[in-house]
């Protein structure tokens, strides 16, 4: 067998293994039942740094409350943050609304099907833009996320540490099942979840691997408390300090950041969610 023939055999064997696993074990996820670009964008933003079960619990309700790009763009931020509670990383909710507003303003309400344009919108990095193109538009694009990274490291770099995405990308492109990119990437992700559940996480061999910082007592937790309280009603700073129950200087610093980011406003001596 020639070198080219051996490589082709390896790729096809890999595809058969991944797709075979998917046919037997594919996850029933609500966002896989639609090709609506808006719904897929919502799911992709929700899934950033958040486990699938938590997203499943929130996704349908969020879509019912904000069923279109326009409804999300015009909704009060307070209402969006209330629907987002429980997902964490509230900055994503703000980015999602900014995305919706830019789609209305820049693209006349139609989510673009070009990766380059998607990447210019707040909160949409290159990998997220690639996943949107694959899942919403069926495009044979190349991208990497944590589960895809795990699959390729497990199969092609078992004995190597510090594997970079630059090393993985040519393999991701070579193995891409171009007849059905949407199914292929779903299969890779499900297989990656399976690998991480049944052995040491292969992604730890990646040079990009970063262990998530502890949530308890973190700035993320305090930010979440502040927003959860102010979603209910505006509060005077003193009342907010008492309710959050953390170091006041730390709370004030985070309040200042939230004001700068556009989450909060200060009116008549009260702090509240921006409109």
Image: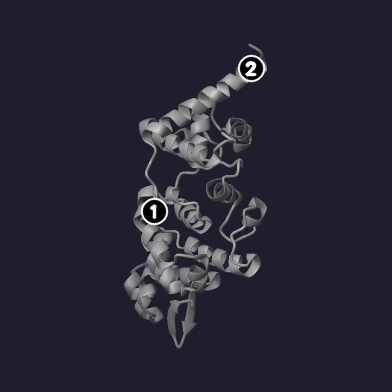
Q: Give the percent coordinates (x, y) of residue 243.
A: 32, 73
The residue at the point 45 percent across, 63 percent down is 90
Is disc 1 placed on a helix, strand or loop?
helix
Q: Is residue 94 above or below residue 115?
A: below
Q: Which mark is residue 55?
A: 1
Q: Give the percent coordinates (x, y) of residue 28.
A: 37, 44
The reply to whether discs 2 and 1 touch (Cβ–Cβ < 8 Å) is no
In this picture the colour scheme is one colour
Mark 2 or 1: the one toward you: 2
Alpha-carbon neighbours of circle 2 within 10 Å: few (<14), some, or many (≥20)?
Answer: few
Q: Is residue 79 visible?
A: yes
Q: Nearer the viewer, residue 239 or 93?
A: 93
User: Which comes before the other along the chain, label 2 or label 1?
Assistant: 2
Is disc 2 placed on a helix, strand or loop?
helix
* Left or right: residue 209 compared with residue 221: right
Point out the image quarter for the N terminus: top right
The residue at the point 61 percent across, 20 percent down is 7
Residue 246 appears in which quarter of the rendering?
Answer: bottom left
Residue 199 appears in which quarter of the rendering?
Answer: top left
Q: Which residue is mark 2?
A: 5
């Amino acid at each position: 067998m020639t070198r080219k023939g051996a490589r082709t055999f390896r790729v096809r064997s890999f595809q058969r293994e991944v797709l075979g696993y998917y046919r037997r074990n594919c996850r029933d996820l609500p966002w896989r039942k639609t090709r609506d670009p808006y719904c897929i964008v919502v799911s992709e933003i929700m899934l950033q740094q958040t486990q699938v079960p938590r997203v499943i619990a929130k996704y349908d309700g969020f879509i019912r409350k904000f069923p279109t790009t326009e409804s999300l763009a015009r909704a009060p931020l307070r209402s969006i943050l209330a629907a987002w509670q429980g997902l964490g990383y509230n900055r994503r909710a703000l980015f999602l609304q900014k995305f919706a507003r830019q789609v209305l303003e820049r693209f006349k309400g139609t989510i673009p099907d070009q990766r380059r344009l998607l990447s210019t919108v707040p909160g949409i990095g290159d990998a997220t833009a690639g996943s949107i193109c694959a899942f919403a538009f069926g495009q044979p694009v190349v991208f990497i996320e944590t589960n895809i990274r795990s699959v390729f490291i497990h199969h092609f770099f078992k004995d190597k540490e510090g594997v970079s995405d630059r090393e993985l990308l040519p393999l991701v492109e070579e193995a891409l099942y171009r007849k059905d990119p949407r199914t292929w990437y779903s299969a890779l992700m499900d297989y990656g979840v399976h690998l991480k559940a049944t052995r040491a996480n292969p992604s730890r061999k990646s040079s990009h691997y970063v262990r998530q910082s502890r949530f308890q007592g973190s700035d993320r937790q305090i930010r979440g408390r502040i927003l959860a309280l102010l979603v209910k009603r505006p509060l005077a700073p003193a009342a907010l300090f008492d309710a959050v129950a953390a170091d006041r200087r730390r709370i004030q610093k985070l309040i200042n950041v939230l004001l700068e980011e556009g989450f909060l406003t200060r009116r008549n001596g009260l702090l509240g969610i921006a409109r």
